[in-house]
Amino acid sequence: MSGFWRPGASTPDADRPTTLLSADVDADDGAGPSCIHYERNPKASLAARRRALPIAAHRDEVLYCVERHQTTVVVGHTGCGKTTQIPQFLRDGGWCRGGRAVAVTQPRRVAAQTVAQRVAEEVGCVLGDAVGYAIRFEDVCTPGKTEIKFCTDGALLRELAEDPLLTKYSVVMVDEAHERTLATDLLLGLLKKVQRARRDLRLIVSSATIQAESFAEFFDASAAAPGGDDGKGGDEPSRKPVIMSVEGRAHGVLMHYLDEPTGDYVRTAVETVLEVHRSEGPGDILVFLTGEEEIDDAVNLLEEEAREMRRDSHRHSSAGLDLVVCPLYAGLNPAAQLEAFRPPKRGTRKVVVATNVAETSVTIEGIVYVVDSCFAKQKAYDPERGMESLYVAPSSKASANQRAGRAGRVRPGKCFRLCTELDFRALADVTAPEIVRSDLASTVLQIKAMGIDNIMNFEWISPPPASNMIKALELLYALRALDDDAKLTKPLGIHLAELPVEPQLGKMLLVSGEMGCVREALTVAAYMQVRSLWVTHRGQKKRLDEMRQRFAVEEGDAIMILNIHDAYCDARNQSKFANNNMLNHRALLRAGDVRAQLKRHLDRLGVITNSSCGEDTIPIRRAIAAGFFANAAALAPYGGGADGSVFNSLRALSARARARELRVHPSSAIFNSRPTCVVYCSAVRTDREYMRDVTVVEADWLRELAPHFYRAVPARA
């Protein structure tokens, strides 16, 4: 392979495998939204396919461990089938009798939906009947009838707030726990508390090998039992967790590294795919990039090259295969997601360009080659600035091994890492848990809503930084969600905890009732919950800017959202309207669904939801200021230059700290404007700090709406 070498090989052309992987990844947790699977033997029955999975030989051992131990840690290697089969073992073993159910959590929405579809197919029921799923703003279950419920960690946390003992469930399975998302860590801490009160609740933690012992140690309550461990001969289950390992069916994966570092890993990934296509045998290719923009760029380049290949027959692959390119990321429309999972037609090689959603949560069969950028998007939180940002960072070795393991499912595969071997060795062993690099305001609010007031003594697998916790408490206190004793206020704090949005956005929704602009607030909040409102295409940035300007107004991005929503609702052909204006039709539909659900939440809380401010934008902008007053900024002296207006954070100015410079993001409706004062919903840091979802406000509003936070707002010219 040109540009790559293999450790231990005497020449770049040596083909002796030197590095074998047995990555600890779940490989049978579903496929695309419509769950089309690649099968090695498509004529085999579902029962035969289930029996062929490695976990099938361990059915009795799984049921024995669950029966005899409160907590079972399952190490499921590649392709073992634990995600789809263990819930069915439990159902067949009687754990769903008496109206009880089994809950299986997933860290990502895509995984919860696709695995539920797959298991429903295997059980032989309609999705939402015996098998269902629940994610934020969507619940496909039938109360009293659904026996296996797949859900995100966050969805189960919501249930915990309403039912602290999870009385409807006999077993909770936390899948992909080694990903250590913020919701997963919080859920595990709460489940440990629930187990103390409910000795009959069983917990299954699905983990990669590197995390298994730490999970077992965390849930080990045997020392607290009378006389040590119990349940070894009686009816009570043992409080000492058991670790069970299930072999996978991974083949060897040959590793390749770059000779020299690359300055553009997206283009290098494209070149590597083309080199594989020309010189390697049959087998699909999976490319890992960091986000939607990179994926779209790579897909466009590959599709352009594929068209050239079709016109020039001698440029086909050595196997005579045509090239079909499919993107895969969370914001993609379902039909396009489906293509990534569909088996390729005869005579074609499929290339899937994906984010890390394809790392563990979903499985794409037929992959033989993996091209790994060795980068991923990660969240980082700066408590001093109160800013959470998403940035591209090197992935960990554990993550890289998960990705490489995708190449070894069908037959021995190859992984091309777009870094040198020396750089790979310098990567961190595991990715830092999300809890140590996140804003904890929503987490603290959830914990408080469950009656846990002493959050500093809450049991975490990895305790969060004290500075992050303090900043969360400060924000919630400023929002008046907590009182002087750090307890939830009534009714505001309790209502904020019940809304499935961030506390600041929730405050905006609740205040909108008093300001007579609930309809507008619901629209703004709903649109902020969807990704990728605009459709971007390579080489069409200028046209996209023109489309934004059609709806842009000087009052800011929130009012632009209202203009888009009104125009979309008035359009006769909404799909055509979206296409003509470079808007994501699926995102617009999703925003409508979210808006309807948020409206039901406000109705339940007693907020009158039919009020509207009409053409007057002041009420909705005041409501936004009431929620996001902590994110206020004033125009800096001289106002900045051609690269956007410069603002100073009012929080820093009020504290007489060094002025913190913020710029309006280029995608904002007011990028070229210079308003005196603004509030923003989030900030992102790249080479500079940019404000996103920016709304123009009056400085006097901040003193009026948050007098406890701003005594005097400095005037800026």
Image (cartoon, rainbow, N blue to C red):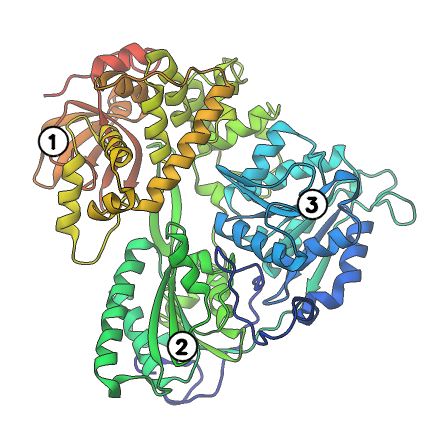
Q: Secondary structure at mark 3?
A: loop
* Location of residue 197 in the rendering, given as x and y in whole percent from the top left corner: 75, 32
Residue assigned mark 3: 147
Horizontal side of residue 174 vs 440, given as left or right: right
- Crowd band around label 3 with a 10 angstrom C-alpha radius: few (<14), some (14–19), many (20+): many
Q: Quadrant of residue 385?
A: top left
- Reading the image, the residue beneath label 1 is 673
Q: Secondary structure at mark 1?
A: loop
Looking at the picture, how far across and down is residue 120, in whole percent?
62, 54
Q: What is the residue that sits farthest to the right in this orientation?
A: 233
Q: Secondary structure at mark 2?
A: strand
From the image, which quarter does the N terminus lie in? Answer: bottom left
Question: Which residue lies under the disc numbered 2?
Answer: 256
40 w.r.t. 379: above or below: below
| Nearest to N terminus: mark 3 or mark 2 | 3
Looking at the picture, how far across and down is residue 418, in whole percent? 35, 69
Q: Earlier in the sequence, mark 1 or mark 3?
A: 3
